[in-house]
Structure formats: C-alpha cells, structure tokens
C-alpha cells in the first residue's frame, strides 16, 4: 500500500486513522455481522451511530439547544434553492458574491424572489473579500448570504459581515470544523461534507429552530422543507447512512485531537509554512490579498501556464497529487484541510523549493 499526499479540494483527504477504523469494521460492525452499508437506517445500531454523530458535532462546535442539526442529501447545491424556499418569506435576500459558489447561490435565489447582490469581488477575480462593515442591506431582506471560505479562490471572511440585524446564512463547506465558530452569529450555516469532513453525498445544515416552519414558499416540495427533516431527526427517508457513519468517525477523531481550538492552531501552522514560502519564492506567488487568505485552500501561480503544468506533472510524479487549480482560475491550488498532516505541507514546500531551483 502506498498513499499519496492528496491536495484535492474535494472529495478530499480523510484521516488515516478513520480510514483504518472503517476498514476494520467493514465486514462486521461491532458484532452485528454486517457492514454499516448493509444496515437498516431504523436499526438500533444505526440509531446509535446517528445520535452519537450529532452529539459529537454539537460538542465540537458548541451548538446551542435551539439549533437543529440536519444530515441532508443533494450536496451544497441543493441548499442554494432550499434556503430561499424556506427562508425567503418576503421574497427578498441580500447576497455577497465572493466567488463561484456564492454566485450560483445568488442566481438560484433569483428564481424565487429578489436576490440583491450587495457586494462582490469579481473585479479582481474574487481574490479578496470586500469591506462588509456598512453594506446597503435591504430593509426587507429575509437574510444576508455569504460563502465563508471560497474554495476555488482561497479567500476567507475573517470577520463576518455587518448584517444590520438581518439573519446571516453561510456556506461553510470548505472551512467546516477547521476552527471554532460562534453558531449564535448565524441563522443558518451549512456545508457539504466532502471538503473537510467525510465522503461525498451529504450536507450538514445547522439551523435556528424558530426559522423552521410550515410557511415555506408555495410549491416547495415536502422533501425540501427543513421541517420534515427536523421533525424526523434526518430520518424522514433513507439518509446517506454510510456517510453519516464516516462523518461520525471524523467527529470522534477531531475530539481525540483536542477539538477545534487545537485544529485551528494546527491549520494555522500548516498554512504558515506554505504562505511563508510563497511570500519569499521567486518562482511562485500566492494569488490572494494577504489579509483575506484562507487556511484551507491555497492558490498560487508561476505566471507562466507551461511552467504551471510542468509543476503539476512533476509534483504528481513525486506523490503530491491534485495540485491543479480550478479550471476557472488556472494555476495551482493546495487544499490543506484538517486531515492533511503538517508533513504533507512540508513535503510540498520542499518539492516547490527544489522545483524553483531547477527552473529559475
Ligand atoms: C464544493 C463547494 C460547493 C459545491 O458543493 P456540492 O456538494 O458539489 O454541491 C459549494 N460551496 C462551497 C464553498 C464548496 O466548496
């Protein structure tokens, strides 16, 4: 067996400890004689799995009792429409467009009502976070929407926008569990788990209870109402049970690591190794305004397309894979999620140094 350092933006690297555990439990999950894949989602064994996963997530994030945790399907993309269908009571919402995912969410919301783009950073290829201290928030806005960590461009809101009392809705897909958060700052936060938590196929929605009701937009399908999932403990229909199980293992791994404060320190340390090198390299440059840099996704370029391609190929041969940037921006991107060890980032920087010496 030989494992690579996988810098994919998602689906992404998972902790080896977790992969080993799920492998060990594959044929016989704790004396049930079956894999979790083969298990009824109504069985006592699975009930324990989902309840433990939810409790561990609550412990990790300090989720208050008046917030519901929902394990849903349809990826982050389905939330682009579920959010307006459930929360756009006045049919008005304000969107801060800091990248492709926020833009898609904004466009989707326009199907349901007036979706105002109140700020954006497209003028400089989304390489910064706009000033959000005094935005023209609509008086009748049902919520203000952000994408908190911009996976493709490598920017992060280090300070939440001033929503002037309006509900904040946030896509945290690529920074989920990377550092502590104050859940009470949000009406709803959600993320696809395939970036920083588990396998693809699930999204976790954390929503304040008073926002869950019957008064969704007319025509909202039953399945797209938060209420049906909240009332049924995410078991209205068959959930992505195996994904919930693996995510639960990751929550336990995070707890054993010391929780989100410790993860934040680790992530800062890892990111510093890479950013420090980029700031001093003569071949590679980071492409994001320094104060808006993400701890999770680090895009960089040489400024020469052929050189970028040569680097990505050579890195792959050295066991450093999935470093090609998103097709919309080019260059390179290293995603260094929770499960990427410091050694992986150090190996990348050593390789970049060597490549720089050989190619300047
Ligand atoms: C990957 C990603 C998405 C899209 O996720 P899907 O699960 O493929 O729908 C949305 N938002 C962010 C921030 C992402 O990183």
Image: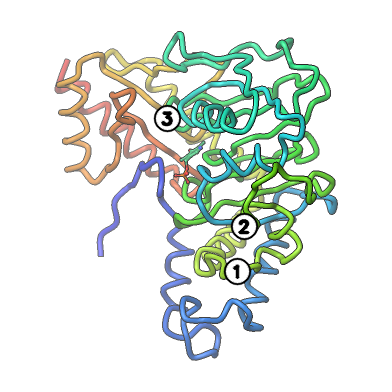
- Across and down, in percent, residue 145 comes to 65, 28
Residue drawn at (68%, 68%), measured in percent from left and top?
Answer: 52
Which comes before the other along the chain, label 1 or label 3?
3
Contact check, label 2 and label 1, Cβ < 8 Å = yes
| Alpha carbon separation for disc pair 3 and 2 | 30 Å
Question: Could you tell which of marks 3 and 2 lies nearer the N-terminus?
Answer: 3
In front here: 294 or 137?
A: 137
- Indicate which disc residue 223 carries: 2
Q: Position of residue 265 (x, y in %)?
A: 60, 38
Image quarter of residue 68? bottom right
The image quadrant where one finds the C terminus is top left
Q: Residues within 10 Å of mark 1 (few under 14, many from 20)?
A: few
Residue highlighted by disc 1:
237
Residue depicted at x 43% and y 78%:
26
Q: CA distance from mark 1 to mark 3?
A: 33 Å
Mark sitting earlier along the chain (2/1): 2
| Residue at image coords 46%, 71% | 22
Q: What is the quadrant of the N terminus in the image?
A: bottom left
Disc number at residue 215?
none
Q: Secondary structure at mark 1?
A: loop
Q: Residues within 10 Å of mark 2 (few under 14, many from 20)?
A: few
Lateral position of residue 278 relative to residue 93, left or right: left
- For the residues carrying marks 3 and 2, which lies nearer the camera in this image? 2
């Amino acid at each position: 067996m030989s494992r690579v350092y996988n810098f994919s933006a998602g689906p992404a690297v998972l902790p080896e400890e977790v992969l080993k555990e799920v492998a060990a439990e594959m044929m016989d999950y704790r004396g049930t004689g079956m894999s979790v894949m083969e298990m009824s989602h109504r069985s006592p064994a699975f009930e324990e799995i989902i309840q433990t996963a939810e409790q561990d997530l609550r412990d990790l994030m300090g989720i208050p009792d008046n917030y519901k945790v929902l394990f849903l399907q349809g990826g982050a993309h389905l939330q682009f429409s579920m959010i307006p269908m459930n929360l756009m009571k006045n049919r008005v919402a304000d969107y801060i467009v800091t990248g492709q995912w926020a833009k898609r969410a904004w466009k989707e919301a326009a199907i349901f009502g007036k979706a105002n783009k109140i700020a954006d950073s497209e003028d400089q290829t989304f390489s910064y976070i706009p000033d959000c201290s005094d935005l023209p928030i609509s008086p009748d806005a049902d919520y203000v929407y952000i994408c908190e960590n911009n996976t493709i461009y490598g920017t992060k809101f280090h300070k939440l926008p001033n929503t002037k009392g309006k509900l904040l809705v946030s896509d945290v897909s690529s920074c989920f569990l990377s550092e502590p958060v104050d859940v009470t700052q949000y009406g709803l936060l959600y993320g696809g788990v395939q970036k920083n938590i588990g396998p693809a196929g699930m999204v976790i929605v954390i929503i304040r209870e008073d926002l869950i009701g019957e008064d969704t937009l007319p025509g909202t399908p039953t399945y797209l109402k938060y209420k049906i999932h909240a009332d049924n403990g995410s078991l209205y229909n068959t959930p992505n049970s195996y994904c919930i199980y693996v995510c639960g293992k990751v929550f336990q791994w995070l707890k054993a690591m010391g929780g989100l404060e410790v993860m934040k320190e680790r992530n800062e340390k890892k990111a510093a190794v890479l950013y420090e090198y980029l700031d001093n390299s003569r071949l590679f440059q980071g492409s994001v305004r320094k104060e808006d840099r993400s701890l999770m996704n680090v895009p960089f370029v040489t400024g020469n397309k052929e050189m970028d391609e040569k680097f990505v190929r050579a890195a792959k041969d050295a066991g450093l894979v999935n470093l090609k940037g998103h097709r919309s921006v080019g260059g390179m991107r290293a995603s260094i999620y929770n499960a990427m060890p410091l050694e992986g980032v150090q190996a990348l920087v050593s390789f970049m140094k060597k490549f720089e010496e050989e190619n300047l």
